[in-house]
Image (cartoon, coloured by chain):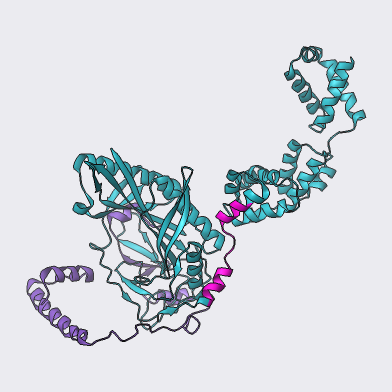
Chain colours: A cyan, B purple
Amino acid sequence: MKYDVIIGCEVHVQLLTRSKAFCSCPNNFGGAPNSRVCPRCLGLPGSLPVPNRDMISSAIKAGLALHCKIAELTKFDRKNYMYPDLPKAYQISQFDMPVCAGGYLEVTADGQSRKIGIIRVHMEEDAGKNIHAQGGLNMSYVDYNRAGTPLLEIVSEPDIRSAEEAVNYVQSLREIMRFLDVSDCNMEEGSLRCDANINLWIYEDEKRFATPIVEVKNMNSFKAMKSALEYEAERQLDEWREKHLTLQAVGKTTRGWNDDRGETVLQRMKEEAADYRYFPEPDIKPISISQNLIKQIKQSIPELPEQKRGRFVQDYGIAQEAAEALTQSKALCDYFEEAARGYQEPKRIANWILSEVKKLLNEKQMSIEQFPVPARQVTELLRIVDAGTISGKIAKDVFAEMAASRKSAAELVETKGLAQISDTGELEDVVEKIIRENPSTVADFKAGKQKALQHLMGQIMNATKGKANPQVTIRLIKAKISGN
Amino acid sequence: MIDDKTLQSVLALCKFSLSDREKEHFKQQIGDILSYVETLNQVDTRSIDPDLGKSLESMSLRQDKAAVGLPTEQVAGLSAHFQDSFFTVPRIIEEMDEITEES
């Protein structure tokens, strides 16, 4: 059966402003419950919201990076619903005049790059958190620290055609938001949340049928997102085969992803019908955005991942995959460029960062920002290797030591006596000794077995604790054996 | 007069319930209020600019500066239902909460 998977994503990102969206309570994560609240975010009568300037500029920044048109005039609206985590019984959001609209994001999946349309980007305030009492207590607890913190909602066109593409779309979005320093987009901590609308277009009897749209919620990681959307596409296909239900007949439903059971489960909605009775927020005047402001914000947009990747491949001659791995974070890009500055083989720097630096970051569970070895020290270490002072293998140990002791490469090589033995006189004794002790290996080598040479090398490395200069050693072995 | 279906959905949204007699009464009353407000539709507003806002610069926006909110004692005093730094509400029982329990 021929069919297409149709997916659209709604992504919420928490903005990294210092204060909340409409009051000056701090916008942080964690802390004692209800310790960052005031009459405004608690919705006490008589308090009035005042929009945060940085929330608006962050929204414009995000919109520009997503190729959106920025509204000349934007306004806030009230979205009404009753739920304990929403103290005012309405959320200040944007309805018909969002701050940004009509953009796109270039996404690669299956080796193919496609433009995914962005319908809109709008600002809204977050709700508080409900915590449900354990042990049969008949109450729920509410913490309003998060209530009123600023969010961006980014809505895509239903342009996504696979679970993989959906994940890549959200990952690209995350990269961009991080590069812009607009949000830290941590899915596990909830600073990036994604819901997806998914259905199938089934081609049968030369007609196209749309299956009922399902909004999938509770996808708390990229892995969960991929599994949930793959599962849901399969489920809809099975349902179609069994019942032939169409979008027109059923409409839209909501299902939550249950990670433990590996399936989506039908959910009841908070409101029976999505009747949010939107109306313009009377406490906040519409906001007009000047071309001058847009120009200013445009100038503050840094080079974005896509452009950086192109430049890294072009200017530094590194592979596309390496460029992709490096552009996962702006700090990693900066580290690479700092280390590669003035070094003749930037490719080696990239490889070193992607293998050795990444390995240590994983081991120590830290981010590149917290990494104790300055970028220029990577350059220094590789220069020491280039000069033949230490081998590449020793360099890896030295690097781990640099991260642990915060000492420089040169200092460690010096104080630990790690410099390679390149002095022929010093090496000759060792080589002669090993040749004497391994007559059968020497015979093998003479018979043309290359493995025998490696065996002898290994013995010499053991004897010198890895400090023998490999090139010098090989030359000596060959000379000694043929001289015998 | 509004119809039963409209009244029912308004009641659901307000979390109200009414007796059958009250329903008839309010269907009439809400209908009257709505038709009274409808009078406003007779005013021709096509020539009026809905843009009440001026530029972002002149609009009273707030600098992004954080300030300490209410002290906990004061927050606690706002509600009779406050326990261990949390506001308490009757248990929210919904199928979706079982799955999407917020942490």
Q: Residue at x 58, y 56 (%)?
A: A307
- Residue most extreme to the right: A425
Reply above or below: A155 against A263: below
User: As rendered, which of A79 and A131 lies closer to the eye?
Assistant: A79
- Residue most extreme to the front: A206
Reply above or below: A114 against A36: above
Q: Position of residue A390 (x, y in %)?
A: 80, 38
Asked whether residue A37 is in view, the answer is yes
Reply above or below: B15 against A258: below
Q: Residue at x 42, y 51 (%)?
A: A220
- The quadrant of the image that shows the N terminus of chain A is top left
In the image, is A260 to the left or to the right of A61? left
Q: Which residues are magenta?
A: A292-311
Q: Position of residue A391 (x, y in %)?
A: 78, 36
Q: Residue at x 92, y 29 (%)?
A: A425
Magenta residue check for A383: no
Q: Position of residue A435 (x, y in %)?
A: 84, 18
Magenta residue check for A301: yes
Q: Position of residue A192 (x, y in %)?
A: 46, 58
- Say which quarter of the image contains residue A432: top right
Asked whether residue A190 is in view, the answer is no
Reply above or below: A105 against A34: above
User: As rendered, which of A390 and A71 lies closer to the eye?
Assistant: A71
User: As rendered, which of A45 and B4 lies closer to the eye?
Assistant: B4
In the image, is B95 to the left or to the right of A160? left
- Say which quarter of the image contains residue A261: top left
